Image (cartoon, helix red, strand yellow):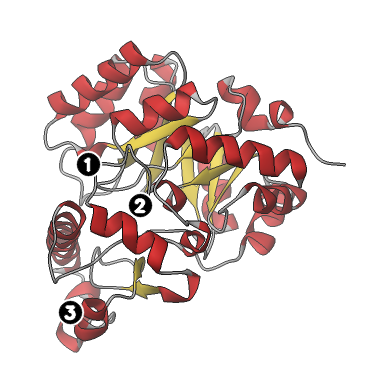
Amino acid sequence: MKTDLKDFALSKLLNIELPVIVAPMFLVSNVEMVVEAIKAGATGAIPALNYRTVEELRSAIQQVKKEAKGPLGINLIVNKSNFLYKEQLKVCCEEKIDYIITSLGSPEETIREARKAGVKVFCDVVDINYAKKVEALGADALIAVNKEAGGHSGPMSFKELVPLLKKECNIPVISAGGVGNGFEMVEIAKCGADGFSMGSIFIASNEAGVSDDYKNACIQYGKDDIVLTEKLSGSPCTVINTPYVQKVGTKQNWFERFLSKHKRFKKWFKAFTFFKGMKKLQAAANSTTYKTVWCAGPSIEHVKEIRPIKAIIDQLKAEYVKG
């Protein structure tokens, strides 16, 4: 029996009509996207790193709250590569956003401080061991990042990961990756998903603040054009396999591998790799450049045109009901 959209755990947790998070995407997510997602009955999150200062982050949060009445999330990188982490966390708690999504590190401090402010915490996980750890720390939900996710993906398929987490954990499991339309939402819901985090299909939206080249690439390329690269953040990350990506390759060279594993240097090398990789993404996302490095996941297979966020969400609802 198919679950009604209003009966998903994520719908109840955030009081939304559609159990979908318009996923936080570096350089892509912005206030306008989240506002339109909320107005359409879903929710949206923005990476804190999309803002150069914590005051810009605070201003963005206040603007969303002013323009839309609904749940807003902020994604925090919680490892040492994010030098603004503590200040970002403080702003999120002071502004009392609805939820924080943690990535790439231990969420212990985030959960402790967020709980004091009444802010929920959803944690990116890729395996059962980490999922149990964050549940024990008090996470409110798990973001089950599978191998079809855009950006930093996991090693398991949703068919493996979601049922495993549902069996072993007692908090909601939000599936991230491999969802490009409402029919695929039905399929993943059958595996036990309590909600969905969807990003790549929203890159080619009117509201996304990236270049038309980036948006059109999501239309022109498909799932078979997505590859993993180690060159952007130090962790495997999915990108569109453009001629430039093919030229520079996706693997670290021997010296980069040495630095990334050396006990003394690895923290600083990873931070440097992340900084350099994000600059490449920024150049490609915001302007026309031959150095085209665009993050995306396999779900761009379903992207056929540039449309408003509301149109994309309305189609998801209709397809889910029909499926």
Label 1 Cα crowd, 10 Å radius (few <14 / some 14-19 / many 20+) = many
Amino acid on which disc 1 is placed: Leu
C-beta proximity under 8 Å, tags 1 and 2: no
Question: Which residue is nearer to you in this view: 262 or 148?
Answer: 148
Question: Which residue is nearer to you in this view: 192 or 315?
Answer: 315
Which percent across, then down, holds residue 23?
43, 43
Residue 34 vs 232, above or below: the answer is: above
Of tags 3 and 1, which is closer to the observer? 1
Q: Secondary structure at mark 3?
A: helix
Say left or right for 272 vs 76.
left
Question: Which residue is nearer to you in this view: 204 or 275?
Answer: 204
The earlier-in-sequence mark between 1 and 2 is 1
Q: Residue at x 51, y 41 (%)?
A: 312
Indicate which disc residue 49 carries.
1
Residue wearing tag 2:
104
Q: Residue at x 59, y 19 (%)?
A: 15
Residue 173 location, quadrant: top right
Amino acid on which disc 2 is placed: Leu
Measured in 3D between alpha carbons, the distance from the residue under mark 3 to the one under mark 2, in whole angstroms, is 20 Å
Measured in 3D between alpha carbons, the distance from the residue under mark 1 to the one under mark 2, in whole angstroms, is 13 Å
Residue 107 vs 287, above or below: the answer is: above
Q: Secondary structure at mark 1?
A: helix
Label 2 Cα crowd, 10 Å radius (few <14 / some 14-19 / many 20+) = some
C-beta proximity under 8 Å, tags 3 and 2: no
Label 3 Cα crowd, 10 Å radius (few <14 / some 14-19 / many 20+) = some
Which percent across, then down, holds residue 49?
22, 41
Residue 48 vs 166, above or below: the answer is: above
Q: Is residue 228 visible?
A: yes
Indicate which disc residue 256 carries.
3
Measured in 3D between alpha carbons, the distance from the residue under mark 3 to the one under mark 1, in whole angstroms, is 24 Å
Amino acid on which disc 3 is placed: Glu
